[in-house]
Image: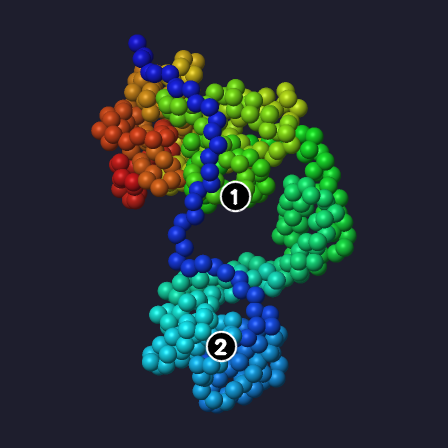
């Protein structure tokens, strides 16, 4: 007799976004237009800082005993702002009223004096490449102004920061500059959409999509008019009835999210998510978006599916954009079909955004293919968990015991012993490779490897808990070999 306890009832509950991790330094973009900046020194690093500060519109006063021709050229032709050369050593009174103080100073004593004088004058100070004397640092910059990206390693590894900058330079087209300039000019045009913030947000979402896909051309007045018309039309439609996206969050690793899933999360008003969705995935949602936990835990607290269905419909009818976020793929044992039926019945518009399934992620972890021309011409997904918490009674055991198939069994932790016994009864070779994988795609992912005969005992000995997937089949045999980096029960 199976005495498995039934799941406890749980109601949907609002949750907060995760707190920000600690920052080594605060990234700040500081307006310098027309402000005075003091720069001490005339070395090559000082020349670069002077050009950078002038490009930001600063009035740069440089103090040094002598200047090279490059400094004179910069003073005559600054990129913006102005550059003044003062052929003398800096003095304490020079720092009064400055917005920033920058020192290209190699002597420790002078660097300490310069930093102390700046602090006494209430001026933020940076001594180039001398973190001990710095209140702020300059990051590596990707310039698509007014789009500016800065990278900081808190002074620990400037070369690393520069390498990241080089990668970003290749990723960000030069054309982004024109779209960022248009965004600056078009911000006031948002008033044409009224005070409705959802309409304004949709305008900028569509603007961003167009900039990303058409960065090679300059935006036009026609773009502006079309974007405003589209945002207004979408908002009128959304105010009548919202929209629901059934989104696959993948197995847990945020890097396995699809681009469509990211876009859906960034445009959602409400995110209804399961217990298995990781905080790192939720962090991609807008911070203003409402988050509601509607998950189910194995043999533990669980929201009723009818409550989840009703909540989706209720939120959509209020004109909200809802993301129903599910671990793995929503169409594989995610009750996506039941939710689709409810949305269709209620007349709610929706879409489905697939995710990387746990079985696919498990195969990647094991470094094996789930199919093989010689060993597995069929891949089958089954559940080891019925509504009553037992092994389903209507499984096709003949198909599951087929030596030419690979089988992925979801939610099989409690029923594995019975599952193994039934497969053996129906003729599956006892030496068929079998794996139990826990927390796939997450920190602490664990693999127990064995055969279908030995897996229940190996699992009991390992005493591992958590979301479990079982993979069975001859195509998996290479993962049992000595060259695999994963060992039994090792994370």
The residue under the point 54% across, 39% down is 289
As measured in the structure, the alpha-carbon distance from the residue carrying label 1 to the one carrying label 2 is 41 Å
Identify the residue at horizontal 44%, vertical 35% (top origin): 277
Left or right of residue 309: residue 482? left
The picture places residue 456, in percent across and down from the top left corner, at 27, 24
| Pair 1/2: label in front | 2
Q: Quarter-wise, where is residue 8 in the image? A: top left
Q: First in sequence, mark 1 or 2: give its number.
A: 2
Q: Is residue 125 above or below residue 446?
A: below
Is residue 170 in sight in this rendering?
A: no
371 lies left or right of 182: left
Please identify the residue farthest to the left as the structure is shown: 461
**457 and 150: which one is in front?**
150
Furthest toward the top, the residue is 1
Q: Residue at x 60, y 70 (%)?
A: 33
* Residue identifier under label 2: 96
The picture quadrant where one finds residue 415 is top left
Picture disc at residue 400: none
- Quadrant of the image containing the C terminus: top left
Q: Residue at x 60, y 64 (%)?
A: 145
Asked if disc 1 and disc 2 are in contact, CB closer than 8 Å, the reply is no
Question: Alpha-carbon neighbours of circle 2 within 10 Å: few (<14), some, or many (≥20)?
Answer: some
* Residue 81 position within the rendered picture, expressed as x and y whole percent measured from the top left: 61, 75
**Type of colouring:** rainbow
Lateral position of residue 194 relative to residue 422, left or right:
right
Q: Position of residue 57 (x, y in %)?
A: 60, 72
Q: Element type at marker 1?
A: loop
Label 2 residue SS: loop
Q: Is residue 316 above or below residue 166?
A: above
Q: Which residue is mark 1?
A: 287
């Amino acid at each position: 007799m199976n005495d498995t306890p039934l799941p406890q009832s749980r109601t949907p509950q609002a949750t907060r976004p995760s707190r920000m991790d600690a920052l080594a330094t605060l990234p700040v973009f500081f307006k310098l237009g027309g402000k005075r900046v003091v720069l001490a020194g005339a070395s090559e690093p000082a020349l670069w800082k002077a050009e950078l500060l002038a490009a930001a519109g600063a009035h740069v006063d440089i103090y040094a005993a002598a200047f090279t021709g490059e400094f004179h050229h910069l003073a005559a032709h600054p990129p913006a702002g102005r550059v003044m050369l003062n052929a003398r050593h800096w003095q304490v009174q020079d720092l009064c009223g400055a917005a920033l103080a920058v020192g290209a100073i190699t002597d420790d004593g002078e660097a300490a004096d310069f930093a102390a004088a700046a602090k006494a004058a209430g001026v933020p100070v940076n001594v180039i490449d001398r973190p001990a004397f710095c209140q702020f640092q300059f990051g590596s910059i990707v310039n698509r102004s007014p789009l500016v990206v800065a990278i900081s390693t808190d002074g620990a590894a400037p070369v690393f920061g520069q390498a990241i900058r080089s990668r970003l330079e290749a990723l960000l087209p030069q054309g982004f500059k024109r779209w960022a300039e248009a965004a600056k000019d078009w911000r006031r045009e948002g008033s044409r959409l009224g005070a409705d913030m959802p309409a304004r947000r949709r305008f900028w979402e569509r603007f961003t999509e167009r900039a990303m896909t058409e960065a090679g051309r300059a935006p036009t007045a026609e773009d502006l008019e079309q974007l405003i018309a589209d945002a207004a039309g979408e908002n009128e439609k959304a105010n009548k009835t919202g929209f629901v996206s059934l989104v696959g969050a993948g197995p847990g690793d945020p890097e396995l999210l699809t681009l469509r899933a990211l876009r859906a999360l960034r445009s959602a008003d409400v995110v209804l998510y399961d217990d298995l969705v990781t905080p790192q995935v939720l962090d991609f949602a807008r911070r203003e978006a409402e988050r509601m936990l509607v998950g189910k835990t194995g043999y533990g607290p669980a929201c009723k599916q009818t409550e989840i269905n009703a909540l989706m419909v209720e939120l959509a009818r209020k004109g909200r954009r809802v993301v129903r976020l599910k671990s793995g793929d929503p169409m594989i044992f995610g009750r996506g079909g039941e939710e689709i039926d409810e949305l269709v019945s209620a007349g709610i518009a929706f879409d489905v955004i697939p995710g990387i399934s746990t079985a696919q992620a498990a195969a990647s972890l094991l470094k094996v293919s789930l199919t093989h021309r010689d060993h597995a011409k069929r891949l089958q997904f089954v559940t080891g968990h019925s509504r009553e918490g037992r092994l389903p009674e209507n499984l096709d055991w003949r198909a599951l015991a087929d030596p030419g198939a690979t089988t992925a069994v979801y939610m099989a932790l409690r029923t594995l012993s019975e599952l193994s016994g039934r497969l053996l009864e129906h003729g599956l070779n006892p030496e068929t490779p079998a794996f139990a994988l826990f927390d796939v795609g997450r920190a602490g992912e664990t693999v127990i490897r064995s055969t279908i005969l030995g897996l229940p005992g190996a699992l009991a000995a390992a005493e591992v808990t958590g979301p479990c997937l079982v993979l069975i089949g001859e195509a998996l045999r290479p993962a049992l070999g000595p060259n695999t980096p994963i060992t039994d029960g090792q994370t």
